[in-house]
Image: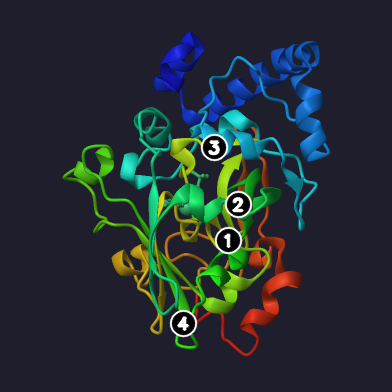
Amino acid sequence: MLIKRTASIRSSEITPEDIYLNRRTFIGKSIGVAALLNTGVLSSFSAIAGRPYEIDPDIPTYRGPGWLEKTLDNLQAGPFRTDEELTPYLDVIRYNNFYEFGSDKQDPAKNAQAFKTDPWSVEIAGEALKTGVFHLEDILKPHALEERIYRLRCVEAWSMVVPWVGFSMGELLKRFEPTSKAKYVEFTTLVDKEQMSGQASAFSTIDWPYVEGLRMDEAMHPLSIFAVGLYGRAMPPQNGAPLRIVIPWKYGFKSIKSIVKIRFTEQAPVNTWQQIAPREYGFYANVNPAVDHPRWSQKLERRLPSTLFDRNTMQTLPFNGYAEQVAQLYSGMDLTKWF
Ligand SMILES: Nc1nc2c(c(=O)[nH]1)N[C@H]1C(S)=C(S)[C@@H](COP(=O)(O)O)O[C@H]1N2
Ligand SMILES: [Mo]
């Protein structure tokens, strides 16, 4: 739906993605702001963000479940916000890694549009007093939604700045009363070969489901969030609707999407990328410019939007710039070994 509606998007299929991203951004800026000012949309969004969102109101957006729409009206400004320039909405929703829907950057935006995210339930399991299967709506009910503007740094050396809609991960996890044996928390993505074309593909290297994990103290850190939206709207399917996590000081692959299970464990979970290539990807995956990926350097990153002519390159910072908040979680650990 999203992809088919405008004729200009068609050109993405024949244009190198970098040029395509830049062109869309330019169009978005030149016509989008004026249109927003006319409709008053800009002012209503800037009230939430404290800064204007440059979103063309003609861009079809995923609405999400009705109950979520109501809570999106009451967004609060969350802590730790970066004031770096936001990555344009179109880049955030059309340049994705979500292998369940294909491995090209534009596959998820094309293949996830009909993804059914309502009703959705999440199983809470393992070392906790309250376990069971819960409706997502019930899980989210007690939490006021915040806007968290974070950097996201992919292990592939590109990055974005995204205004996520979400809330503190620890606040939710606490409600299920993890026991003293809960040293880690594991997250699992949906398996549904009918809906997720990437899972049905014979070329897939991933042993589904996609699994991720955090140490309990990482999960309880105030920077860690569950996210249900971005840019003041419901989470687009390609970005991990209806529920994903965002861990901004770690490489993007830790921020697992479309979660159906949360399990508290005593042993460290084996996350998907570590399982596929343990020499390239570890459990911690803290952003670290001093530790190269075996096949490329991690010193620099390409901040989207990026083009063939202007790569928009910048230095990658330890812990993705969140060292002040999280470095003490790893004091005494050799981060070249625990990568
Ligand atoms: N289930 C699942 N979660 C996933 C992935 C995936 O392939 N499957 N890709 C990860 C990677 S590598 C990145 S960089 C981020 C990208 O999030 P975004 O598409 O919202 O920018 O999602 C992460 N979460
Ligand atoms: Mo990534």
**Hey, which quadrant is residue 189 in on the image?**
bottom left
Residue position for label 1: 247
Foreground label between 4 and 1: 4
Residue kind at label 2, given as amino acid type: Leu
Separation of marks 4 and 3 at Cα, in angstroms: 32 Å
Asked whether residue 290 appears in the rendered view, the answer is yes
Work out which quarter of the rendered image holds the N terminus and state it: top left
Label 2 residue SS: strand
Residue position for label 3: 67
Percent position (x, y) of residue 164? 63, 45
Foreground label between 2 and 3: 3
Residue kind at label 3, given as amino acid type: Trp
Of labels 2 and 1, earlier in sequence is 2
Q: Is residue 270 left or right of residue 37?
A: left
Of labels 4 and 3, earlier in sequence is 3
Q: Residue at x 82, y 25 (%)?
A: 43
Residue position for label 4: 182
Foreground label between 1 and 3: 3
Of labels 4 and 1, earlier in sequence is 4
Percent position (x, y) of residue 185? 45, 72
Separation of marks 2 and 1 at Cα, in angstroms: 8 Å
Label 3 residue SS: helix
- In front: 210, or 119? 119
Of labels 2 and 3, earlier in sequence is 3
